[in-house]
Image (cartoon, rainbow, N blue to C red):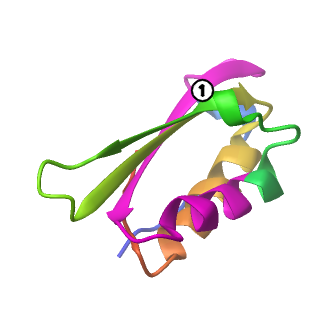
């Protein structure tokens, strides 16, 4: 079970705004990347396609998606992590 503790932007090691790489790994299927981008766009204004890189695992079972974006706050990151982690096909969010 993942527990998120509320923290202010002053209690984090990050200084906002900042460039932030987010990696999402999950079960690969035709709609996985689209589903992840739908969630990401709810939390990241003006997410561009060139900010997204995908890599298929050696066996083809998993897909790793890296989204590099301008993070505006700790709250934004927490909300994004929560929603991505709750998706049934996501195995890990880093």
Residue 35 shown left or right of residue 10 in the figure: left
Report the residue that reaches farthest toward the right.
45
On the rendered image, what quadrant is the N terminus found in? bottom left
Q: Is residue 71 above or below residue 85?
A: above
The residue range painted magenta reads: 13-40
Residue 66 position, x and y percent, is: 48, 37
Q: Residue at x 13, y 48 (%)?
A: 58
* Residue 63 visible in image: yes
The answer to whether residue 23 is magenta is yes
Q: Residue at x 62, y 62 (%)?
A: 34
Name the residue beneath numbered marker 1: 20
| 83 vs 12, nearest the viewer | 83
| Residue at x 78% of width, y 38% of height | 47
Name the image quarter holding residue 77: top right
What percent of the width, then of the height, locates residue 94? 40, 44
Q: Is residue 94 above or below residue 2?
A: above
Query: Where is residue 13 drawn, in percent x and y?
Result: 55, 23
What is the residue that sits farthest to the front in this orientation? 30
Q: Tell me where residue 60 appears, x and y as whole percent.
A: 21, 59
The single residue placed furthest to the left in the displayed view is 59
In-front residue for pair 48/15: 48
What residue is at 75 percent from the left and 47 percent from the top?
76
Left or right position of 22 against 42 = left
């Amino acid at each position: 079970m993942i527990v998120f503790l509320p923290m202010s932007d002053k209690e984090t090691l990050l200084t906002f705004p900042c460039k932030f790489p987010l990696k999402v790994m999950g079960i690969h299927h035709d709609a996985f990347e689209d589903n992840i981008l739908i969630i990401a766009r709810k939390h990241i204004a003006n997410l561009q396609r060139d900010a997204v890189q995908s890599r298929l695992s050696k066996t083809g079972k998993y897909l790793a998606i890296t989204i590099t974006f301008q993070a505006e706050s700790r709250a934004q990151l927490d909300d994004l992590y929560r929603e991505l982690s709750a998706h049934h096909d996501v195995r890990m969010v880093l």
